[in-house]
Image: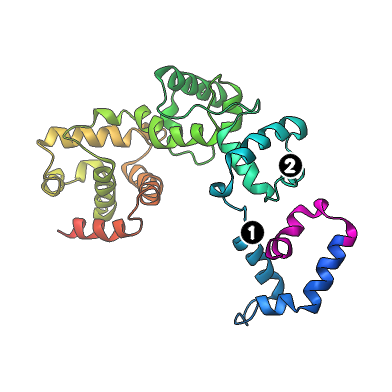
Amino acid sequence: MKTRLLGYFAQSQRYTRNDRKKFREFMRSSQFYLRLANGLPNRTLNSIYRNARIRFHSLKYKKDLSDDIINNMKHYYLIFGKKWTKIAENFMCYPDTLKEHYRLNYNKNGEPYDMGNWSLDEDKQLLDAMRRVLNTDDLKQHIYTKQLPFNQIIDEIDINRSYYQIRNHWLGKLRWSIAQWDQLEDSWTQKDTARLIYCLFKYEFTDESTIDWDEIKEKFVNISSFNSLMKNWRLIKQTVPSFECKSYKEIIDFLYDNFLPQFIRNSDKGIDYLKEFEIFFNE
């Protein structure tokens, strides 16, 4: 009864008009909404009911899907296509649960996506497709682009990967390979890059020629030489689109506004890094 009362609206076509009428009558006579809202005076009845339906429906999450449901879902997909509400009626399950599982794991032919490490051929196909779609041979200028046309890019490649795999592979690995950061010296990490950008931004040097690199090098004890630090900085600033045409201030502002937020957002420590960088800068 709990499943029916909380979940039947999601599969309304499964029940007859008379069934739904009986459900509503029972909910009114038993004061179901008021009992559900007991102790929650600052929420509307509708918002409480909707939240409860999401939280307590028995088949909301991927972990609730059995192998039989998954296999049958693939069968129904080939019949009904993307009519997820109609497919979900056969499993007493939320349509979005099935849709999200299918989108992440299967291609349009019902075959599972390739998982695991990417091959060099897959990397090459993706980069070549990005150059064609973006109409450029220099992908460095798109390292920080927030909205890339991945749907168009996918149409240009013949690899069995999902949209999210392709997008995340570019964001997490390929774009940094394009930046040639594998050539950074002395085991330089992205965290070191974030620290350097933060320090240069805070020092407010007016021009690159006025930067006190000796003072900055003292902060980076892992750097073996002044030349190594300068080489790393050159590789970092080259990731800024059209950096040759920008002033030092424009370059450092761009890196502060684009690299730092991505580094903090993708890390486990998040905002704590800002405090750490401030301590690092003041030491």
In this rendering, the answer to whether 60 lies above or below 121 is below
Identify the element where label 1 is drawn: loop
Left or right of residue 245: residue 16:
right
Label disc, if present, on residue 57 of the rendered structure: 1
Mark positioned earlier in the residue sequence (1 or 2): 1
In this rendering, the answer to whether 247 lies above or below 282 is above
Packing grade of label 1 (10 A; few <14, some 14-19, many >=20) is some
Please state the extent of the stretch shown in magenta in the rendering: 1-18
- Spatial CA distance of label 1 from label 2 is 17 Å
Q: Amino acid at mark 1?
A: His
Identify the element where label 2 is drawn: helix
Query: Where's the C terminus, which quadrant?
Result: bottom left
Label disc, if present, on residue 87 of the rendered structure: 2
Residue 214 visible somewhere in the drawing: yes
Asked which quadrant contains residue 224, the reply is: top left
Left or right of residue 165: residue 176:
left
Q: Quick one: 44 or 93, which is closer to the camera?
A: 93
Residue 263 drawn at (x, y percent): 36, 47
Residue 137 visible somewhere in the drawing: no
Q: Main secondary structure of the magenta part?
A: helix
